[in-house]
Amino acid sequence: MGQRGYLAGLLGVAYPTNFAPTTVASVPPEKWDLFHEMIVTDELSRSASGGLVWNLIGGFGISCPPLVKFGRPELVKRILPDILAGDKRICLAVTEPDAGSDVANLTCEAKLSDDGKHFIVNGEKKWITNGIWCDYFTTAVRTGGPGMEGISLLLIERGPGVTTRRMDCQGVWSSGTTYITFEDVKVPVENVLGKINKGFRGEELSLSLSLSVSFFSLQLTPTPVIMTNFNHERMGIIIQAIRFSRICFEESVKYASKRRTFGKPLIEHPVIRLKLAHMARQIEASYSWLESLIYQCEHMDETEAMFRLGGPIASLKAQATVTFEFCAREASQIFGGLSYSRGGQGGKIERLYRDVRAYAIPGGSEEIMLDLSIRQSMRVAKAMGMKL
């Protein structure tokens, strides 16, 4: 993927031609957009394995954008080319044993050294995708006081004091889910991404609105580094969840067309057709919403998209993963015992069923996403005078 230029096209930013080993052969870099990124992610997801997709682009897709957007030029120049070539790996280390969706309460600590040249990092991170193989860790750390105002983002390089161990999880086995321990790790101050204590300001947007007859402008000050990553991460989860839902539907149609029960093909039973109909309507509705949001993201700057689309993206993240869970269950009912056995005719369904929770929880749980969507919708309506 690195040598073919695909990794460089999965960052949610303009194609970084200066750092990529090559460009995608079929698309000029200046024409590469979010729809191309969607296509790459969607096609990888035809593998019917969340573990494979996350192995290839999971950690990379959520950890590399903050480096590209907020890293010092000399840091980006030194590190990014090897990552985009696929020779080095990078992951996002935010979640902790006691701080998941409640990121503002993380405790991994980074104290400035006496000479002011390094941060000394101590703490733990849990459920980190790809961490077992990674050379770099885009890490949320506490550099200030309590709450979201004291959090910074550091690029930590593997070395003395960094310990990783693989975790056994229900699904996405080949994604390399990792428990990370940092013990007195020295990190140069130049590795800060963005500004100190301004890495995360929560989902509560701090807005400055300027209104005129013909336009409005939005400003976020300071730029919340971690938060800008959420929309990109959630869109990736949405694309994968919808494709996995389609696979459940496709496999169910194939199996129901050849499996015979009570003297006729399974698909001739009305109850089976009803299951397929409910799967199809949810998949198509979710996919149409996805295309609409990608189009809007493509035609807004990042600040406006964060303000106006953060809520809808969160809502679709919940919708897509609920759809995936529904389709996996209905497919399992259609396959019967075959979906309970690993491998064989129902192997894809069995594997995807185990992957469901890996999509429903990471990136923001269903409950938090739905609550965020309403809160953000109310803010947009209040700020812009829009009707709900």
Image: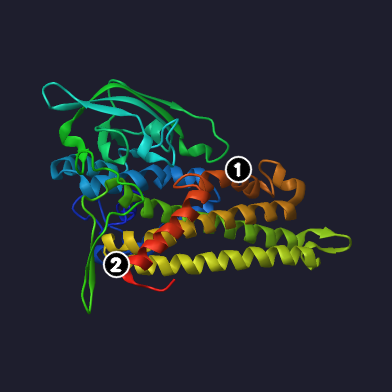
Q: Position of residue 68 (x, y in %)?
A: 23, 48
Q: Is residue 151 visible?
A: no
Q: In the rendered image, which quarter contains the C terminus?
A: bottom left
Of tags 1 and 2, the one toward the viewer is 2
**281 sits to left or right of 268:** left
Q: Which residue is mark 1?
A: 354
**Residue lying at 12% horizontally and 26% vertically, measured from the top left:** 116
**Residue lying at 15% horizontally and 35% vertically, measured from the top left:** 190
What amino acid type should be assigned to the residue bearing mark 1?
A: Arg
Location of residue 378 by image quarter: bottom left
**Residue lying at 43% horizontally and 70% vertically, measured from the top left:** 292
Q: Which residue is mark 2?
A: 300
Query: In this view, which residue lies farthest toward the left?
Result: 115
64 or 26: nearer the viewer? 64
What amino acid type should be assigned to the residue bearing mark 2?
A: Met
Name the colour scheme. rainbow
Q: Few, some or many C-alpha atoms within 10 Å of disc 2 (few <14, some 14-19, many ≥20)?
A: few
366 or 388: nearer the viewer? 388
